[in-house]
């Protein structure tokens, strides 16, 4: 039996999208805003792909209703897919540079609403503005091309937005985001240029695969704001260190008065403080050390130090680096101050990961209390 090309293309595309959906929901993985909006986008594209598949069935006999429904759904709601794409991109824009304040989202919502109304009216009234089925054969209507060009222009607009806001997107993720609208744009153009072959959703699936491999996977192991190791990866490495039964050092670091930085100078300044701290930690400690943003304004370091003396020297070196950094940025409206508590792990009975983290937390808070008392 020979299958039509669209059957093969849609089948493989749906399988890829379904795979991405499930691997993005790996058990034990924290479903942050990026992962949630990514899966919402996947579900929207899968729904459109199913509708496209139904729309390609014979428009006669027992498949007639589903064929008409699928065609209507694609024409009425494919622009809504851009809305979910925009929400995903927005989740990666740092600080206050959000798409909710831009004209692109408002135009997209307006365009989608007008499109749904016009396609629904054309379907009910049988005007054939966008598509029709004379003799049960799919035929493009007079508004098919203007509508298709409108969709492509939104791809261009999203690309322009990403370029304009590139400084507020983690540099490691920018290439993938630059390519995302391009894949969709090429697929949409080929869909318009060549009849009978499904390119648009195949191109979108390739773009989503790129985002997963270059952004989503990295997000699981890397803090997107600071570039430090994620808490998930840190705890995995810590477990391996404990299993090795070899002594090692750990340091817990907290930014002093971080809330006042956010309250007095804005969250964008707070983000700068977090990035500056991560950069300082990476520059102060050896490259083979594990530098992690543990949560909020807390950072964790894993070191190969096997004695308390070396650990104390490392903390002293960090404080010196902070002081040098404050002298370099003497016009900054605040002084960056850190509290660091270090603990040496040795293979004693009952010293598991939770016990070690508790000791680190206590050591850091003792240091923070000393700093506040001396203020």
Image: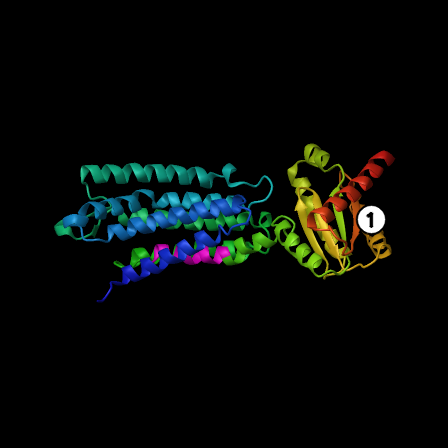
- x and y, in percent, of residue 326 in the image: 80, 45
**Which residue is depicted at the point 67% across and 47% down?**
294
Quadrant of the rendered image containing residue 257: top right
Crowding around mark 1 (Cα neighbors within 10 Å: few <14, some 14 to 19, many 20+) is: some
**Which residue is depicted at the point 71% across and 36% down?**
261
- x and y, in percent, of residue 18 in the image: 40, 54
State left or right for residue 312 relative to residue 228: right
Task: Point out the stretch of residues depicted in magenta.
Answer: 199-212
Rendered position, 302 above or below 115: below
Residue 24, magenta (yes or no): no
State left or right for residue 309 relative to residue 252: right
- Give the quarter of the figure containing the C terminus: top right
For the stretch drawn in magenta, the main secondary structure is helix
Q: Secondary structure at mark 1?
A: helix
**Which residue is depicted at the point 28% across and 38% down?**
118
- x and y, in percent, of residue 138 in the image: 20, 52
For this rendering, which residue is in front, 367 or 92?
367
């Amino acid at each position: 039996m020979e299958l039509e090309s669209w059957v093969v293309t849609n089948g493989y595309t749906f399988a890829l999208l379904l795979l991405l959906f499930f691997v993005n929901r790996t058990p034990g993985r924290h479903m942050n805003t990026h992962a949630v909006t990514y899966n919402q986008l996947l579900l929207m594209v899968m729904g459109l792909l199913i509708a496209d598949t139904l729309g390609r069935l014979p428009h006669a006999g027992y498949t007639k209703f589903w064929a008409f429904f699928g065609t209507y759904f694609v024409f009425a709601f494919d622009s809504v897919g851009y809305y979910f794409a925009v929400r995903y991109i927005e989740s990666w824009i740092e600080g206050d540079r959000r798409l909710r304040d831009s004209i692109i989202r408002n135009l997209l919502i307006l365009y989608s609403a007008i499109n749904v109304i016009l396609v629904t009216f054309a379907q009910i009234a049988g005007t054939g503005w966008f598509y029709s089925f004379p003799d049960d054969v799919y035929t493009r209507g007079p508004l098919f091309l203007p509508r298709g060009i409108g969709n492509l222009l939104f791809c261009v607009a999203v690309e322009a937005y990403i370029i304009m806001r590139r400084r507020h997107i983690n540099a490691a993720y920018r290439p993938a985001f630059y390519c995302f609208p391009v894949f969709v744009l090429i697929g949409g153009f080929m869909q318009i240029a060549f009849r009978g072959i499904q390119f648009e959703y195949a191109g979108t699936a390739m773009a989503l695969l790129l985002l997963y491999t270059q952004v989503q996977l990295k997000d699981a192991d890397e803090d997107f704001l600071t570039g430090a190791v994620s808490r998930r990866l840190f705890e995995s490495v810590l477990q391996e260190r404990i299993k090795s039964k070899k002594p090692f050092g750990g340091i817990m670091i907290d930014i002093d008065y971080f809330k006042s930085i956010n309250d007095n100078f804005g969250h964008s300044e707070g983000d700068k403080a977090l990035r500056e701290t991560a950069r300082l930690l990476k520059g102060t400690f050896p490259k083979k050390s594990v530098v992690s943003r543990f949560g909020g304004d807390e950072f964790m370091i894993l070191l190969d130090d096997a004695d308390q003396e070396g650990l104390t020297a490392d903390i002293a070196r960090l404080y010196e680096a902070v002081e040098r950094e404050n002298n370099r940025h003497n016009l900054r409206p605040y002084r960056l101050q850190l509290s660091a508590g270090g603990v040496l792990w040795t293979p004693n009975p009952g010293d598991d990961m939770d016990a070690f983290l508790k000791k680190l937390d206590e050591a850091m808070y003792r240091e923070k209390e000393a700093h506040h008392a001396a203020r």
